[in-house]
Image (cartoon, rainbow, N blue to C red):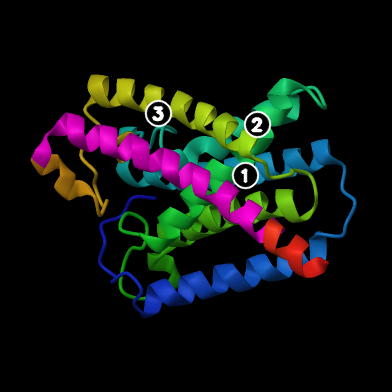
């Protein structure tokens, strides 16, 4: 999902992609939020969809290039669903592990999805969505990241997950775990997982002018801020609704 940027951010192609994702997500959440699904089965469905989309991307790239794309190892922030949902499916109901994974399924995943779609430097592809045959990777990528947003929002609006301050700490724990793996892989393989090394496509790449340590530390801290924001915004919305609800 990491094509070079050719279409401009917030240009026609980008805005059309965002509009379609927003409309589809609104329709899905409106239709499904009142459905009483079994949580385990729902998590399994989400898990399968994320893995199918990931294999659609990797399979295409392996067939096209004749080798596994090492820079697409699942060590990016957008890879979190590939870890969170299998663990969440296997976790015992009402356990500490389930509580932590519920938080991770909300904050980090929705944050990563939103950031990827708002700053699509590595996923947007060419100047137009047509012909579709030339937009396979952008279509898969926009679908994957749009689904990240849907699953996170659905967890909240359906009542599966209750937003809380505690969730911020839990979500950061999970994110930090993936960050540590990404830092090790970046060092060993000279890659840019989670944009912690070279910042390819990141608007904060200029921080590299101040040194690698400054850049990487800043990106880690920004990552924690990004993970925290959905919780803070969610709690603010709940507070406002409770005030006006009275």
Q: Tell which residue pokes out farthest to the right in this image.
A: 36
Q: Residues within 10 Å of mark 1 (few under 14, many from 20)?
A: many
Q: Nearer the viewer, residue 2 or 154?
A: 154
Question: Residue 101, which numbered label?
Answer: 2
Left or right of 67: which side holds 239? right
Say if 102 sits above or below 206 in the image: above
Region rendered in magenta: 210-238
Q: Which mark is residue 72?
A: none
The structure residue drawn at horizontal position 57% and vertical position 44%, both measured from the top left corner, is 107
In the rendered image, residue 200, in percent from the top left (x then y), is placed at: 24, 47
> In which quadrant is the C terminus drawn?
bottom right
Q: Is residue 186 left or right of residue 41?
A: left
Residue 88 lies in the magenta stretch: no
- What is the spatial separation of the Cα atoms under label 2 and label 1, in whole angstroms? 9 Å
Residue 84 appears at what percent x and percent y? 61, 32
Residue marked by disc 3:
179
Label 3 or label 1, whichever comes before in sequence order: 1
The residue at the point 36 percent across, 60 percent down is 120
The question of residue 211 being in magenta is answered with: yes
Crowd class of label 2 (few under 14; some 14 to 19; many from 20; radius 10 Å): many
Q: Nearer the viewer, residue 44 or 231?
A: 231
Q: Is disc 3 placed on a helix, strand or loop? A: helix
- First in residue order: circle 2 vs circle 3: 2
Task: Please report contact status of discs 2 and 3: CB closer than 8 Å, yes or no.
Answer: no
Q: Mark 2 near mark 1, Cβ–Cβ under 8 Å?
A: no
Question: Circle 1 sits on which residue?
Answer: 106
Give the percent coordinates (x, y) of residue 221.
Answer: 35, 37
Q: Residues within 10 Å of mark 3 (few under 14, many from 20)?
A: many
**Quarter of the image where one finds residue 171:** top right
Relative side of 95 to 21, left or right: right
Q: Give the alpha-carbon distance from disc 2 to disc 3, as whole Å.
A: 16 Å
Q: Position of residue 67 (x, y in %)?
A: 33, 34
């Amino acid at each position: 999902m990491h094509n070079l940027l050719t279409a401009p951010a917030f240009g026609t192609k980008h805005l059309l992609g965002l509009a379609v994702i927003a409309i589809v997500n609104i329709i899905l959440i409106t239709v499904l939020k009142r459905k009483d699904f079994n949580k385990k089965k729902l998590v399994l469905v989400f898990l399968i969809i994320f893995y199918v989309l990931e294999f659609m991307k990797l399979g295409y790239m392996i067939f096209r290039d004749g080798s596994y794309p090492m820079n697409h190892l699942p060590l990016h922030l957008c890879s979190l669903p590939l870890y969170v949902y299998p663990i969440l499916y296997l976790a015992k109901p009402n356990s500490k592990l389930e509580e932590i994974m519920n938080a991770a399924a909300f904050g980090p995943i929705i944050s990563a999805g939103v950031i990827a779609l708002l700053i699509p430097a590595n996923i947007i592809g060419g100047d137009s969505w047509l012909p579709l045959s030339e937009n396979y990777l952008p279509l898969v990528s926009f679908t994957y990241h749009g689904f990240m947003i849907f699953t996170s929002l659905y967890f909240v609006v359906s009542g599966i997950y209750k937003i809380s301050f505690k969730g911020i700490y839990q979500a950061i724990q999970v994110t930090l775990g993936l960050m540590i793996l990404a830092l090790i892989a970046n060092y060993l393989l000279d890659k840019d997982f989670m944009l912690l090394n070279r910042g390819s496509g990141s608007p904060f790449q200029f921080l590299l002018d101040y040194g690698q340590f400054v850049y990487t530390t800043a990106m880690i801290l920004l990552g924690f801020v990004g993970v925290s924001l959905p919780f803070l915004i969610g709690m603010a919305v709940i507070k406002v609704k409770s005030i006006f609800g009275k």
